[in-house]
């Protein structure tokens, strides 16, 4: 039997700083992530058992069943996953806390007779998941932020930009991904935040505002303050530190 070509929505998740925790802790966080993903897919109306899945070692790659609306992989799925990871982290020790990077893409994949799936869309998905801006955004975010999301241009154009219920385009920031041979635009989102803080300009002050931009100050959870300019730029200060 040959391979079949089919359009699928694709998700990949990777655990931040999973190495060096020891086998027991690693197996625990792998189990927590797997259970949280399964519950999040089911709560989003996506049959987990009908999904194609591959292990990434410290993460997982998922092809949703054919015909699943791509919007569901953002809302409510990302929110459902965030809620479960936050709940786990409240009572977890340092060795078992989980923060994850999430990448979303879609395209025609080759389906093998044994349930395997391959193709160029999976290469794009891998580049998004490993993208430096995604890693940096999660590393710079407060520990209470459990996930950072990056979606491809294709996924963004067909889901985020339309402002479907539960998806706010203003909470996504356009970036450029350059990984190996792949260079493309993508859109970054931090779970639980109204907007993604902008990347600081090279050699510049990340808190500096362009002339003429007004500033509003709002209290934020985590004893922080949010400084946002009218054009949507936002700097987050936690306990007096930017």
Image (cartoon, rainbow, N blue to C red):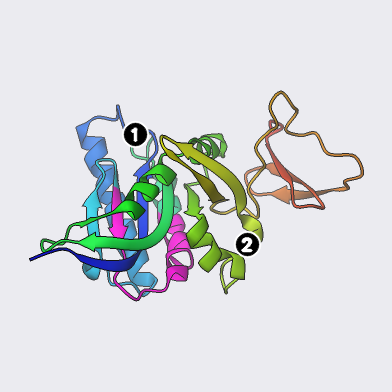
Magenta span of residues: 60-84
The answer to whether residue 159 is visible is no
Q: Position of residue 93 (x, y in %)?
A: 37, 37
Q: Position of residue 165 (x, y in %)?
A: 57, 74
Q: The N terminus lies in which quarter of the figure?
A: bottom left
- SS of the residue under disc 2: helix
Q: Quadrant of residue 110?
A: bottom left
Q: Position of residue 125 (x, y in %)?
A: 38, 50
Asked if residue 131 lies in the magenta stretch, the reply is no
CA separation in Å, label 1 and label 2 = 34 Å
Asked if residue 67 lies in the magenta stretch, the reply is yes
Q: The C terminus lies in which quarter of the figure?
A: top right
Q: What crowding class fits label 2: few (fewer than 14 Cα within 10 Å), some (14-19), or many (20 or more)?
A: some
The answer to whether residue 206 is visible is yes
Q: Is residue 149 left or right of residue 226?
A: left
Q: Which residue is mark 1?
A: 95
């Amino acid at each position: 039997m040959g391979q079949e070509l089919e359009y699928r929505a694709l998700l990949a998740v990777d655990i931040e700083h999973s190495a060096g925790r020891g086998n027991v802790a690693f197996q625990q966080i792998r189990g927590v992530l797997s259970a949280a993903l399964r519950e999040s897919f089911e709560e989003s109306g996506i049959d987990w058992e009908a999904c194609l899945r591959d292990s990434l070692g410290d993460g997982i790659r998922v092809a949703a069943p054919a015909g699943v609306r791509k919007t569901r992989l953002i809302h409510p799925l990302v929110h459902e996953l965030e809620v479960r990871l936050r709940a786990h982290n409240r009572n977890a020790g340092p060795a078992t806390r989980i923060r994850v990077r999430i990448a979303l893409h879609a395209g025609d994949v080759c389906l093998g007779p044994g349930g395997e799936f391959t193709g160029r869309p999976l290469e794009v998905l891998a580049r998004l998941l490993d993208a430096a801006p995604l890693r940096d955004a999660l590393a710079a975010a407060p520990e209470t932020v459990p996930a950072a999301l990056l979606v491809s241009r294709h996924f963004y154009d067909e889901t985020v930009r339309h402002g479907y219920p539960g998806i706010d385009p203003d909470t996504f920031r356009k970036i450029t991904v350059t990984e190996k041979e792949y260079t493309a635009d993508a859109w970054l989102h931090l779970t639980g935040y109204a907007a993604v803080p902008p990347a600081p300009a090279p050699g510049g002050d990340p808190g500096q505002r362009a002339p003429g931009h007004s500033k509003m100050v709002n209290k934020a959870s985590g004893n922080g303050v949010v400084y946002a300019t009218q054009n949507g730029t936002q700097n987050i200060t936690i306990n007096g530190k930017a």
